[in-house]
Amino acid sequence: MRIAIDAMGGDHAPKEIVAGAIKAVEHFKDLHITLVGKEAEIRKYLTSVERITIIHTDEVIEGTDEPVRAVRRKKNASMVLMAKEVSEGNADACISAGNTGALMTAGLFIVGRIEGIDRPALSPTLPTIGGEGFLLLDVGANVDAKPEHLLQYAIMGSIYTEKVRGVASPRVGLLNVGTEDKKGNELTRDAFQLLKESGLNFIGNVEARDLLTGAADVVVTDGFTGNVALKTIEGTALAVFSMLKTALTSNLQSKLAAAVLKPQLKGIKTKMDYSEYGGAGLFGLNAPVIKAHGSSDANGLFHAVRQARDMVTNNVANTICEALSKTSK
């Protein structure tokens, strides 16, 4: 299996990206990774070249670049060349921790969209209290959506959750302002009816306050609402851990208590660490395209590789295509 990685994307590139790639090839013996970026910088951290190759380029898409313009003008950017590796059949999947908008643009225009998919969805797996996690789509690939798009998100999310995460008959929920069937705006009311008739394991509306309790395995919404929900969850988690740290280091008594609770606190932090679930998949494309978190360390990149590998192994793109062809008949 071959995976192309943008070695220059992310806050800690290329050091952590290279370290994550090395960890991945050591763990997965069937894996070959192509790192795309500035070769001299990559080699500073490349302690092993077994099943790792480099495609050199000096051009990089920055986080401040306008996505569409950057992809069109920076033809030799590491992210663009990474996507081309997939479109030209040299790689089965690709990963970047760089500019999210540019990656979505490269995925759409270079990797290509599955026939029958109107709009791809950006979809992270987020942690839950019980540790199972849930898939949220869309979180920003498309700010606006139609009811038919939410149905497609649900189909793609259900297939991914079953094939890759191993959840039998995933529970699909619709993010809404209440759990009653008639709640919400025109979009959610119409989407509710489509989901109800879809044949999926649709459990109805779910509220944002219930997301982290594991109310559903797959939660669908429009990109605007999903992005707000995602950023709220991330911000709340950071704030809670910050407050805990302040409280547990405020005096000697608190520090002693913290020392006793350290294993339990570490366990909670690990359970709520989004990087353990991989990156955000750009679902609806001809091959797996994974957006790793911008602050990904080696472990985060490793799990993004694991996620991409699982998607290729389970032929998720083709399964989505087949499912959509059945629903359109």
Image (cartoon, rainbow, N blue to C red):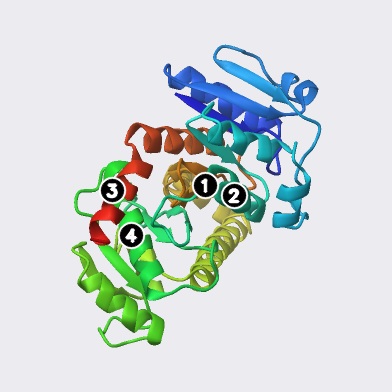
- Screen quadrant of the N terminus: top left
Residue 56 image offset from top left, x and y in percent: 74, 25
Label 2: state its secondary structure.
Answer: helix
Q: Say which residue label 1 marks.
A: 112
Q: Say which residue label 4 marks.
A: 218
Which mark's residue is nearer the viewer, 4 or 3?
3
Mark 1–mark 3 Cα distance, whole angstroms, equals 17 Å
Residue 35 vertical placement versus 237 (above, below): above
Q: Say which residue label 2 marks.
A: 109
- Mark toward the start of the polypeptide (3 vs 2): 2
Q: Residues within 10 Å of mark 2 (few under 14, many from 20)?
A: some
Residue 68 vertical placement versus 305 (above, below): below
Whether residues under marks 2 and 1 lie with C-beta atoms below 8 angstroms apart, the answer is: yes
- Screen quadrant of the C terminus: bottom left
**Count of numbered tags:** 4
Which mark's residue is nearer the viewer, 1 or 4?
1
Depth check: give the residue in front, 19 or 85: 85
Which amino acid, mark 3? Glu
Which quadrant holds residue 143? Answer: bottom right
Q: Residue at x 54, y 15 (%)?
A: 51
Residue 121 image offset from top left, x and y in percent: 47, 58
Which amino acid, mark 1? Gly
Residue 178 vertical placement versus 260 (above, below): below
Residue 11 image offset from top left, x and y in percent: 71, 44
Mark 3–mark 2 Cα distance, whole angstroms, equals 22 Å
Depth check: give the residue in front, 270 or 153: 153
Q: Residue furthest front?
A: 329
Q: Say which residue label 3 marks.
A: 322
Q: Residues within 10 Å of mark 1 (few under 14, many from 20)?
A: some
